[in-house]
Image (cartoon, rainbow, N blue to C red):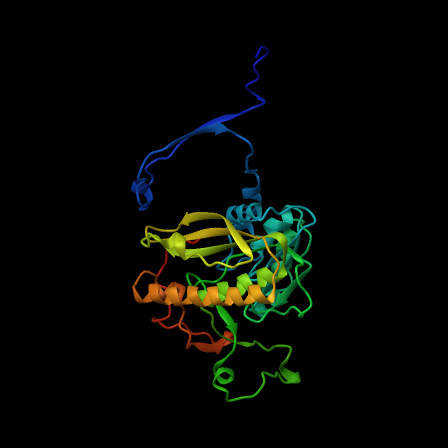
Amino acid sequence: MSGRVNLRNPEHKFWLMETDDYGANNGLPPVVQKRIFFGREVGGADRKLLPTYQLKSRTYLGPTAMDAEIAFLMANQAMVKPGKLVYDPFVGTGSILIAAAHFGAMTMGADIDIRVVRDGRGPDCNVWSNFKQYGLPMPIGLLRADNNLPPWRPGLKEVFDAIICDPPYGVRAGGRKSGGRKLLKGVVGPYTVPDDKRTDHIPSTAAYSLVECVHDLLDVAAKMLVLNGRLVFFYPVLREDESAENHFPEHPCFVLVSASEQILSSRYSRVLLTMVKRGPYTKEIEEVARLKHLEFKENHLKWLEDGNLHSAVFSPNESVCVAESDIKVSKDTKPKYRGKYV
């Protein structure tokens, strides 16, 4: 083609990328085979977002807050855009919803710890103040809710365009569900809180295994996501397990469209799974999903027995049932992994 070449503002950009042997520097495994990629740039990330939303300048921050860059990647995987309704059932301090709100979505979150969603660290240091810090629209609502016992009324369904979350799997914070020592042992009747203690009451919780947590997440997503809605969540794996890609949970309503590994250490990874809802939720689907869950749970336990999964990460002690305000972690229940968490 004839015409003037404009290198400062080109119509097309081409990239040459080469994988490198990064293992020698940070302890990660070396690249098995060096590869070279060449192609035309069709889109790029707005790198200016990262300094603006970096965690070190965040008003309210928890120990498991999602890194800003990863949160934006998750929002992109969910195809978040203005007018969409995004839900995070493990909202914590709101990092994922902040990324969704930046792209114009309406947001809603829930967490089992009422102190996170209600109190924070004061009136000017809570989840709401994080949105105020960036001038983002406030969430429609933040609920104290249990993923194991969803709060939605039976007739409500298919309201969310995307569910994006990082389920608790015991690396930095173990999963919890409603329950307690007295409640589970049947010492008391229905879980009723006296009127004079409702204001400051912290509900009791019990251990919540990864298998059960993911099953409940898929069940809620199948019911509450619109058709073609997306479920995006992290799932932990051991890098030593060569068949880890076959261990991902399944649901008849969903099709897995992406599985992106993030290496945490030489032994541990977590995989960002993106699923698209392709079919409606019915009674027949519910039964098929239940059978898939039982099969997955049986295989999961077998992997534990074979030593292929780390029990402290993937299967927290089900017998530990304590009030959230009285949690005391013993040496036996502390996660043994202390690598970088991003």
Q: Which residue lies furthest to the top in this view?
A: 2
Asked if 122 appears above or below 248 in the picture, the reply is below
| Depth check, front residue: 118 or 309 | 309
- Residue 132 placement, left or right of 165: right
| Residue 37 falls in image quadrant | top left
Q: How many marks?
A: 0
Q: Do we see residue 21 in this rendering?
A: yes
| Depth check, front residue: 128 or 280 | 280
- The residue located at (40%, 54%) in the rendering is 246
Q: Do we see residue 125 in this rendering?
A: no
- Residue 139 placement, left or right of 330: right
Asked if 205 appears above or below 237 in the picture, the reply is below
Q: In which quarter of the image is the N terminus?
A: top right
Where residue 5 appears, x then y in whole percent?
Answer: 56, 14
- The residue located at (64%, 77%) in the rendering is 199
| Depth check, front residue: 302 or 238 | 302
Where residue 289 appears, x then y in whole percent?
Answer: 52, 64
Where residue 57 appears, x then y in whole percent?
Answer: 55, 50
